[in-house]
Amino acid sequence: RRDGRGLGDLFGSICVVARPPELVAAGWIVEPRAWQAFAPDLAGVHRRAGDFESGELEERVLVGVGDVVRHVLHPPDGATSCGRTLVFAVSVAHSRALVDALVAAGLRAEHLDGETPAIERAGILARLAAGDTQIVCNVDVLSEGYDLPDVNTIVLARPTASSGRFLQMVGRGLRPAPGKDQCRLLDCGGNLERHWWPTLDVSDRYSLDGAPVRRGEPAPASPW
């Protein structure tokens, strides 16, 4: 539950059927290779329903659009391209601003949100799968259930206080594919410091009494 309340009133026990290290070892997911690019100033931003208030958050991230684009244009590992990329934005205005800046920089980028018509959404995702589109910026659309193993890069342009949302966004890039043994993760929201390494086994931190315990260990991410 995003409000942090436990589920003990509904369930009697937690059954852990698979842990991330086991899934990596078995080849079901790949490890991310992450860089903490930068983080916006979130001082004074309120929280609502377990995450940052989107209107206040939008104001803080819009000023950093250029920084996000710069990091996408020049991947930290020296690659000439980020490959197929998913960018997670705070709002429609933020996502569209990112797309405009990416296109202005010469990249093939498109925007997707919950109001995008189904036929248009299908076309955008088909172009990404085919490689005709390099980057799709989205707002709460592709964080759950979307499966394109060829995604090479995840850009977290959205800071989130929700560990579940954080793991869902990162997880879109962890599907294995031929020739892919890692996923590039560019954190532009301070999320790696706020949460934990995406493939760390944190099953012992969850209980039916409430939210997972954050133990404060540093995220093993490379500096920019």
Image (spheres, helix red, strand yellow):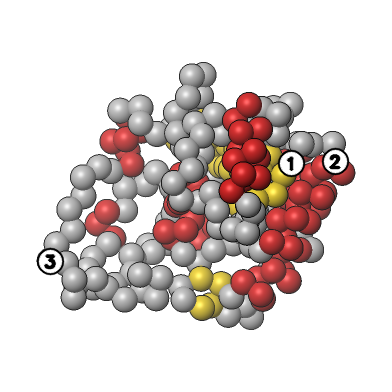
Q: In this view, does 5 lie to the left or right of 221?
A: left
Q: Badge 2, how many Cα within 10 Å: few under 14, some, many 20+?
A: few
Instruction: In the rendered structure, find residue 105 and report the number of the disc placed on it.
Output: 2
Q: In this view, does 54 lie to the left or right of 93?
A: left
Q: Mark 1 points at which residue?
A: 109
Q: Where is residue 21 in the image (x, y as percent from the top left)?
A: 32, 38
Q: Which of 157 and 205 is in front in this view?
A: 157
Q: Which of 70 and 78 is in front in this view?
A: 70
Tell me the mark number nearer the camera, choosing from 1 and 3.
Answer: 1
Residue 79 occupies quadrant: top right
Helix, strand or loop at label 2? It is: loop
Eyeballing the image, is 8 above or below 103? below
Q: Residue at x 63, y 26 (%)?
A: 130
Gap in angstroms between the C-alphas marked 1 and 3:
46 Å
| Amino acid under disc 1 | Ala
| Amino acid under disc 2 | Ala
| Amino acid under disc 3 | Gly
Q: Earlier in the sequence, mark 1 or mark 3?
A: 3
Gap in angstroms between the C-alphas marked 1 and 2:
10 Å
Q: Position of residue 81 (x, y in %)?
A: 71, 29
Tell me the mark number nearer the camera, choosing from 1 and 2.
Answer: 1
Whether residue 43 can be seen here? no
Residue 105 occupies quadrant: top right
- Are the two marked residues, 1 and 3, in contact with CB atoms closer than 8 angstroms? no
Q: Where is residue 59 in the image (x, y as percent from the top left)?
A: 73, 71
Eyeballing the image, is 107 above or below 215? above
Q: Residue at x 59, y 48 (%)?
A: 118
Q: Residue at x 50, y 51 (%)?
A: 143
Q: Mark 3 points at which residue?
A: 12
